[in-house]
Image (cartoon, rainbow, N blue to C red):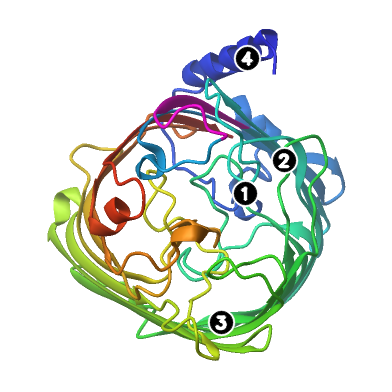
Amino acid sequence: MGKNNLLIYKIAFLFALVINPVIAQNKISLLRYDDDFTSLKNDSLKKGLDQLKYVPLRANNYISFGGELREQFQVYKNINFGDVPPTYQDISTNQLWHRLMVHSNVEVGNHFRFFIQFNNTLRFLNDNPIAPEIDENQLSLHQAFAEVKLDYLKFRVGRQELLYGNNRLITVREGPNTRLTFDGIVIKKAFKNGGVDFLAVSKVISKQYVFDDESFKEGLIGIYGTQYFNNRKIGLDYFALDFQSKLRKYNYQTGSENRQTYGIRLFSNYKRVNFEVEGAYQSGKFNDVSISAYTVLGDVNVTVLPANKGIIGFMASVASGDNNNGDSKLNTYNLLYAKPAYGLAVPIGATNMVSLNPYIKINPIQRLNVLGQVFFLARNSNQDGTYSPGMIQNRPKPNLLFSSTEKELGELYVVETNYQQTKNLWLSFDASYFNAGNYPITTVSGKNVKYISFKTTFKF
């Protein structure tokens, strides 16, 4: 993109910083089609950006507009522990991520609606090769679906974002520059104290240029349900999914994958002490090899400073890796479409992984959230490598596949802050330091990683 375009984005960014300084309740959701502005439906005195919500078309028909502008400056030192492809010019670099998303929601009566969203993501300042699914998609149709609402049923068909399993199963991938979306159908059934979704979808593969995204390369069919107990203080999620793909590799072996995932998640919502327990098992076939993989997670936290929402917690998780490259089983747990479990500092996903994670959360002043945490990470199996959150194996290289028996990845220290300046504007600062362990050191490069991020997000 040229300098003139970059100037336009800077002007838009400055506009976002000064507009709408009034503090008010935030009605904007992570999934923008879940935004709740119904209080404005019959408001004849709407002001500012609220005038873009529930614009009447004719009797009981409305159109609403919304959007997001996100600018994020990042500093990387020793990308991927200093182990980068030959096409990279630098192992330490700065970059600017730009994200612009605009959408429209049309409600036709009480039972029909149409939602459409366009996406523009760009990367500046970094001379290394662009990863389209993460860094840049110059223009895409990000979401476009029709929805029919009947009492306790919703039928949604088209391109849409999904979020299930506390971001550890299927997510929108909010951290990277380009969010994740799917093509297909979702049927939502609500009932007393819960609901269940049926989904048949295919991941949209984000490409770099204008309207060039691809779909129907991978398939996902199944159900995800939630049931609440004890006045919604206890929740139980349950899911069963069938995944089919020819795109993923395990220990650099390609093949046809048909994988089933079955799991439950039990969680609480009490004032002082809370917990979360999740487990999943995977079966199926990868070529002619049987799949047997698992993941288990436990999290417990205690509120110690109620006035400041001060929380101390500890989480531990295990995900299987392949046990024996020579046997007739594949034990690598497939993350499906999970979020980056350890942030953006290093390209490591939570498969073939043992993780111990103490953390603290606090609101020291109004509208400021602070999270501090440490991850102690190790490979679960030394017969398998490490994979990115998108299930792309990145360590070790093919010629060094079984050269190291070390398991220790190291310690990752993370501080994340988020400040809501207005009902539309958020400011964030994140910093991470990864102290490399024996496994990165013995697989070519093992340099310590430093990462800093400054981010501002304006939503309306």
| Disc ID at residue 225 | 3
| Disc ID at residue 103 | 2
How many numbered marks are there? Answer: 4
Mark 2 vs mark 1: which is more N-terminal? 1
- Residue drawn at 44 percent across, 22 percent down: 21
Mark 3 vs mark 1: which is more N-terminal? 1
Q: Name the side, left or right, on which 371 lies relative to 251.
A: left
| Amino acid type shown at disc 4 | Leu
The nearer-to-camera label among 4 and 2 is 4
- Residue drawn at 59 percent across, 37 percent down: 135
Say what secondary structure mark 1 lies in: helix
Tell me the CA gap for discs 3 and 2. 28 Å
Tell me the CA gap for discs 1 and 4. 26 Å
Residue 383 covered by magenta stretch: no
Say what secondary structure mark 4 lies in: helix
Percent across and percent down for residue 222 are 67, 82
| Amino acid type shown at disc 1 | Arg
The nearer-to-camera label among 1 and 4 is 4
**Which residue matches tag 1?**
32
Give the magenta-colored segment's residue range: 87-99
**Which residue matches tag 4?**
6
Labels 2 & 1 near each other (Cβ < 8 A) = yes
> Closer to the camera, 294 or 88?
88
